[in-house]
Image (cartoon, rainbow, N blue to C red):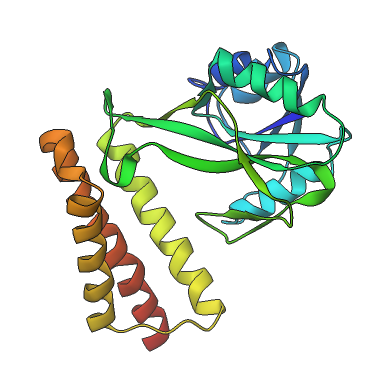
Amino acid sequence: MTVVILTYNEEKLIEKAIQSALPCTSHVLVVDSGSTDQTTTIAKELGATVVYRKWDDDFSAQRNFALQHVTTQWVLYLDADEFINQELAEEIRRVTSQEQPFYSYEIVRRAFAFGKRFKHGSMRPDKVQRLFPRDAVTWINKVHERPETNLAVKTLKGYADHYTYTSWEQYWNKFNHYTSIWAEDAYKRGKKGSYLSAFGHATYGFIKITFLDKGILDGWLGLVMCCNHFMYTLMKYVKLVGLDKR
């Protein structure tokens, strides 16, 4: 099995990410998009193979590019800010040593941001498909990418800790970048929007995250993140309207 990690200036996290992956396999592939810090040096020192693909605002393209360099039967995708625990590592070793039938496997993620673990709202624990037979997956969408596979899905035991944001500067940089990528991708696919629909989507998202998904139970910071979710959704569609009018 090969563990694939996408990176760009992740020198503070990449060592921990690789170390958490090594109990699963010795094959770690880092797909770097032009880091200017010590990310690639650290990865190579830990035995990872590092390949480069120029960043073009397309996360799926990065993940699909990685498959060209995977020679093992199985591939596991991790982000540089995700660290798997021992139980999950043991589960991964177990399922990848089995014979057919094959499945697509999802992992449980626990979210941490600004020094706090979140249990509700937009940052509640979630499940993401990350482990596949190499020839059975293709990624789609430039941002908030998702895998396409015909395999049945199973959930692995254990979890991965997901350390998302450490500063508000980092948060707002991603906020602006991701909403722009989403709007541009949606516009190219022919999606239309209006200011009224933008407020409608944002309001529905706020109500769902705050009350149905109980984001308000994460305290004041949880409420802040719910309000930010409203703004994130609003800006996605406002930027789409801007592209359409332009």
The correct choice, above or below, for 89 with respect to 184 in the image is above
Quadrant containing the N terminus is top right
Across and down, in percent, residue 149 comes to 71, 55
Query: Residue at left 43%, top 55%?
Result: 178
Tell me residue 182's x, y (percent): 46, 64
- Asked if residue 132 lies left or right of residue 116, the reply is right
Q: How many marks?
A: 0
| Residue in the image at 50% along x and 21% along y | 13
Q: Nearer the viewer, residue 109 or 30?
A: 109
Residue 161, image x, y percentages: 45, 25
Residue at left 57%, top 59%?
142
Specify the quadrant of the image occupied by residue 34.
Answer: top right
Above-or-below relation of 65 to 89: below
Residue 97 higher or lower than 71, as above or below: above
Q: Nearer the viewer, residue 67 or 168?
A: 67
Residue 70 visible (yes or no): yes
Q: Quadrant of residue 194?
A: bottom left
Q: In the rendered view, would you say 143 is above or below 162?
A: below
> Which quadrant would residue 86 be assigned to in this image?
top right
Position of 15 compared to 192: left or right?
A: right
Question: Left or right: where does residue 136 sit relative to residue 196?
Answer: right
Q: Residue furthest front?
A: 101
State the image coordinates of residue 128 (x, y, percent, origin top left).
Answer: 54, 43
Image quadrant occupied by the C terminus:
bottom left
**In the foreground, 37 or 107:** 107
> In this rendering, does residue 15 appear at all?
no
Q: Residue furthest left?
A: 220
Residue 181 appears left or right of 229: right
Which residue is most to the bottom? 245
